[in-house]
Amino acid sequence: MEKFKFYCPTEIIFGKDSELSTASLIKKYNGHNVLIVYGGGSVKRSGLLDKICQQLSNDNLSYMTLGGVQPNPVVCFVNDAVKKAYQANIDFVLAIGGGSVIDTAKAIAHGLKYPQNDIWDIWTKKITLTNTTPMGSIVTLAAAGSETSDSAVLTNEQTGQKRGLSTPFNRPCFAIMNPQLTYSAPNYQKACGIADILMQSCYIAYFQTYINESMFKCVIEHSLLFNI
């Protein structure tokens, strides 16, 4: 029998309408002034962004929104976001999207504790990360699993370097997972998510081989079923 340890402090809220608990969860983790980070227009077109903003307003939570996160998030976007968020006294970061949005939110959360520094200094470990700002996520794409992981990836567009950072501070406070929220993602993004799931599963240890085999079959079967 293989031995293993599993530690995932992220609170997972799974199921239909689970996003309705967003405001109460933010309050649970002492958030009052929220930065909502998202990517393209799908969360706007689906009405999800407006739904979350209205919910925060109803619960007397202040917020600001920041869209435009691209795949393979870049350092300059994060640095600019940190400046805006710091000036607005943000104390909680909420990601609405997939892995790139969540990784960006993690980086912004870290940067708010080191507002005078370039975020790349944390990724290159010139600065030792000892604290972060609480953050949570509403997942709209099944892919890398950043919503519960201790990792985040950033790209330095000036040097062309892409680096990952693993630290317990990367763990979101909560991850809201309503599968229905993934329906509005474009087929291309769903296909990228499928490839991400399959490729990252190849790194899993041997004792999970049979679990992975079943997951591969499930992912492929449903990809064919929905013509992705």
Image: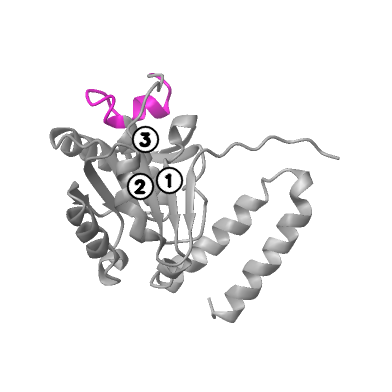
Residue 219 image point, x, y percent: 62, 67
Q: Magenta segment, which residues?
A: 111-126
* 147 versus 50 height, above or below: above
**In the rendered image, which residue does mark 1 sit on?**
174
**Residue at horizontal 33 percent and vertical 53 percent from the top:** 22
Residue 11 image point, x, y percent: 48, 45
Q: Which image quadrant is residue 124 in? A: top left
Residue 217 image point, x, y percent: 70, 68
Q: Which mark is residue 25?
A: 2
Q: Which mark is residue 159?
A: 3
**Mark 2 packing: few (<14 Cα in 10 Å), some, or many (20+)?**
some
Q: Secondary structure at mark 2?
A: helix
Say which label, 1 or 3, has the lower sequence index: 3
> Residue flagged by tag 3: what amino acid is it?
Thr
Q: Is residue 147 magenta?
A: no
Say which label, 2 or 3, has the lower sequence index: 2
Q: Secondary structure at mark 1?
A: strand
Mark 2–mark 1 contact, CB under 8 Å? yes
> Residue flagged by tag 2: what amino acid is it?
Leu
Say which label, 2 or 1, has the lower sequence index: 2
Q: Which image quadrant is residue 105 in? A: top left
Mark 2–mark 3 contact, CB under 8 Å? no
